[in-house]
Amino acid sequence: MASSPARRRAWIWGAVAAGVVLVLGAAAAFVALRPDGQVAQKEATAPQTGQVNRADRLFPPPSKPAPDGGLNQHVSAAATHGDTVVVVGGETVGSSYAARPIFLVSDDSGTTWKSVPPPGAMSVTADLVAGGDKGWVAFPSRLTTYTPMAWTSADGHAWQPVEGAALGDMIGYNLSGLAATDSGFVIKGAQDASVQKESPTVVWTSADGRRWQRVTTTTALPAGRTSLVAHGDNVLIDGGTADQTSGRLTVRSADGGRTWQTTTLDTGPGTPVLATDGKSFYAAFSKEFTSTTIVGSTDGASWKEVGSSEGYSPNGFAVGATGFYLLMDAVPLGKPGHGEEAKLLHSEDGSDWDSLGTSRELKSYQPVLTTTRTGALLSGDTSGVFSTDRPERLDLRMFSASPDSDVAPIDFGGVAGLRYPVTRVNDLRHAGDVTVAVGHSQGMASAWWSTDSGATWQRSDLETPGEFTAVVHGPIGWLAVGPGVYTSRDGRTWQRSGHDFGTIKEAAAAKDSYLVTSTKAAKTTFWRSTDLVSWQQVASPFEFPSGLAGGEYGYVVPGMCPDAGTTANCLMYSADGRSWRPMPAIDLPDGQGAWTTTAVVGRDTVIVSGLAHQGKTSAGSITKTFLVRLSPSGRWEEPQVAELGGQGLSQLGRHGDAWIGLRAKKGEVVLVRSQDGRAWEPRTRVTWPESMQSQAIGATPDAIVLVGHVRTATEDYPLLGRLAP
């Protein structure tokens, strides 16, 4: 089976929410579901062949979970109205791209907090939020055709989705500014910029947050990196010019964003950071790059200086009932330590400033900073959000400060539903007398082993932060990749390789060697070993490999190859992992080109699955799914367009001398089997919970074992099925 990261393999399995049914000939097995379609109980019993169980108790957890529990959570925006504060952000688990929004609300200016996730939103994060007399609105940073979703709330506690036609005019836009006005709400966005010029800014307004209208104006609006603030019905946008000429462009509106006029905000070469206290606009900037100047305006038309501060290039700026707050680098530009830590400054009137704390944890590229009735709230460092080797990630960090108290972290540990245990199985494989599964459990890279074809599992001795994404078996033992490369002779006891691979991507094994791909200094590198101890760098077949697969026949890598001045998807083959040659081109019917996504290597053949598209490059519309077979002579046999009931194959693998795969269609997944890679026979039909995501399929002598996971607003747990081969 191809050993590729779980993030690339995971895809949504559609299914009916009425129940889980496995059909094996005339037999059927049922798993009880709650009315919401989720598995009802936590099963501690091993699944028999033909059953599926909730499996978080079948895969033992680590003895010492990671502090973050494996949840990559971050803060994106915060807003205050009266005593109510709403903080929004997002969450991913491990290396998965699947996301869910985070909503935190406080009714006492940030003293106590509740987690209030919106219903039905499991694939998008919340990045913008605003609240006022008309209620609350939150948006993702981009509206796509797949997830056109926003949210509204009357009080910041109960959120309802806004979908479909109400947002149709915004789909395809990057949204970067949202504010509440006396008339309702205003939001701005832009499509992707071209090489020649910035994409024009577009503004929409809404009276209730659910129905939005695009604003038509002849006034040129700022472009590039813009910022938006509002008080009353006065709205201000500042940014660059659409043709990227020097200077800045500022526009204002006095009617909630419906009409616009150009105004003047003289910041010299400095870039202003905008803020409002609900009565006036303020801008902080470094006009001469020697100090920070603060100017104010009631309507955005005329400005006057209200204060200044030492230091320059502020990262964050907020004004509220308790005064002015500036977040800036603690060390001047050009001095040792610049950019490593930040400090928060406070002033009652903009003239005399006091430091409320200096810390690396305050440093953030685009910090969140808002005021409350009693002080200020700000986000912490987000630099660890994608790290798998850093258990002390600071991605979900918020701090509070006030004129009478320095910056202090907010403890979210007691917020119910914000943190929850997560176990995921990303890959599994059988060899000899043992089945090995790898993934992560509560933030720790985890490996489990089974000697009864996946009926029961024991945890290995591994205790390391991070996530395993793939496991392979080769000539002398096991290899798992994730936060480094780990090896095992028996699948039970593991050791970490001391070799410096860089960032691990994929792994595979052939009859006499192992291959690992990694990235280091933005370059893909191949590493080869025959003993799992010493590793030698080998020439990469091309720049962008993906889907490394290995087996007795050798290694196969899909990737991008030069093609008439551009790049096209292609396949490379190697018998030993050292020397590579292109595989014959795959010619599909009707002039379609082949975009390879998965390869499985057998004893003397290679099965490849992918997407067919018009044209010879990656451009063009995807039309079908193909399946082809490489003969022992090294030539592709006539390609077979494997529609299989209108759907394609995924999770390809081997079971003895046969090939197995999964065929997905709405409401079911079918296990299919083929002796020759041409004719595929449906064997088992499976319907899963609606929110099920597949992770891996593995063949043991007695059963086909497939694992996936279910994710809700408050749970994330694995499911394990054992099917007759």
Image (cartoon, rainbow, N blue to C red):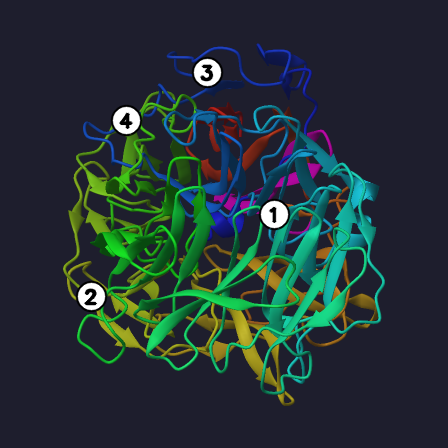
Q: Amino acid at mark 1?
A: Pro
Q: Which residue is mark 4?
A: 61
Using residue 676 as the reference point, say whether residue 47 is left or right of it. Answer: left
Magenta segment, prevailing SS (helix, strand or loop): strand
The disc placed on residue 500 is 2
Q: CA distance from mark 2 to mark 1?
A: 38 Å
Separation (CA) of disc 4 from disc 1: 33 Å
- Is 525 located above or below residue 676 in the figure? below
Location of mark 3 (residue)? 48
x and y percent of residue 65 in the render? 24, 31
Instruction: Name the residue at 35% across, 70% down.
Output: 576
Position in image of residue 668 (x %, y %) = 69, 30
Residue sitting at 30 percent across and 53 percent down?
362
> Of tags 4 and 1, which is closer to the observer?
1
Q: Amino acid at mark 2?
A: Asp
Whether the residues at callouts 3 and 4 have beta carbons within 8 Å, the answer is no
Is tag 4's residue or tag 1's residue first in the polypeptide sequence? Answer: 4
Quick one: 421 or 25, which is closer to the camera? 421
Element under label 2?
loop
Q: Which residues are magenta?
A: 651-678
Which residue in the protein does label 1 denote? 140
Disc 3 and disc 1: Cα gap in Å?
43 Å
